[in-house]
Image: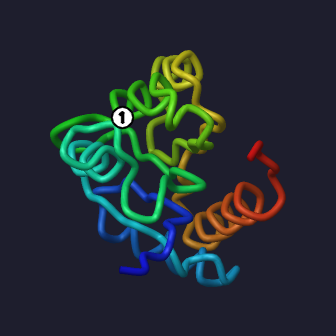
């Protein structure tokens, strides 16, 4: 079975935000290998199938776009687990959220987030922000090995 590696794991429960994010990434031709999950529990199941330390089919994503306000397991817990695991700690994680709470931002950085972006309300600004994020983290940013 030939599985394409996931470039971006989008963890977002709002279908409108998912569609806008995918549209913005397609605009930069970087939406080919995006895995979308709608809650924190599904994200953890995707990252560690069966609760093991085994990588998902095709390997770990190159970038995680993470909403904080998620059902079942919130984004901060997903971030905590991502950054505390030897296998996933170097994956860039960008919090992409509507939360402007200082406490969410402080906790995200304490847990090791690479970037914290508040979703712009304006459609054009939202798509431009996501497009720029994808371009930077997938094409310009360099990571080891």
Foreground: 101 or 141? 141
> Which quadrant is home to the N terminus?
bottom left
* Residue picked out by circle 1: 78
Q: Answer above or below: position of 113 versus 10.
A: above
Q: Tally the numbered discs.
A: 1
In the figure, residue 110 lies in which quadrant?
Answer: top right
Left or right for 126, reference 82: right
In the figure, residue 98 lies in which quadrant?
Answer: top left
Left or right for 101, reference 11: right
Left or right for 61, reference 129: left
Foreground: 50 or 9? 50
Q: Position of residue 102 (x, y in %)?
A: 52, 21
Image point (51%, 27%), residue name:
86
Q: Answer above or below: position of 89 versus 21.
A: above
Image point (29%, 43%), residue name:
44
Q: Position of residue 48 (x, y in %)?
A: 31, 44
Q: Position of residue 76 (x, y in %)?
A: 38, 29
Structure colour scheme: rainbow
Element type at marker 1?
Answer: helix
Image point (56%, 77%), residue name:
31
Q: Answer above or below: position of 3 versus 111.
A: below
Mark 1: few/some/many CA within 10 Å (<14, 14-19, 20+): many
Image point (46%, 22%), residue name:
84
Q: Answer above or below: position of 36 versus 69.
A: below
Q: Position of residue 11 (x, y in %)?
A: 38, 53
Left or right for 120, reference 137: left
């Amino acid at each position: 079975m030939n599985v394409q590696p996931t470039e971006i794991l989008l963890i977002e429960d709002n279908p409108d935000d998912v569609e806008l994010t995918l549209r913005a990434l397609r605009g930069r031709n970087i939406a080919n290998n995006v895995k979308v999950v709608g809650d924190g529990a599904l994200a953890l199941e995707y990252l560690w199938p069966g609760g093991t330390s085994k990588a998902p089919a095709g390997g770990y994503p190159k970038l995680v776009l993470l909403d904080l306000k998620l059902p079942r397991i919130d984004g901060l817990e997903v971030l905590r687990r991502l950054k505390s695991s030897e296998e996933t700690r170097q994956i860039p994680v960008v919090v992409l959220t509507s939360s402007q709470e200082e406490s969410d931002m402080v906790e995200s950085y304490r847990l090791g987030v690479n970037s914290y972006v508040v979703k712009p309300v304006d459609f054009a600004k939202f798509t431009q922000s996501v497009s720029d994020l994808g371009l930077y983290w997938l094409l310009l940013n360099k990571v080891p090995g």
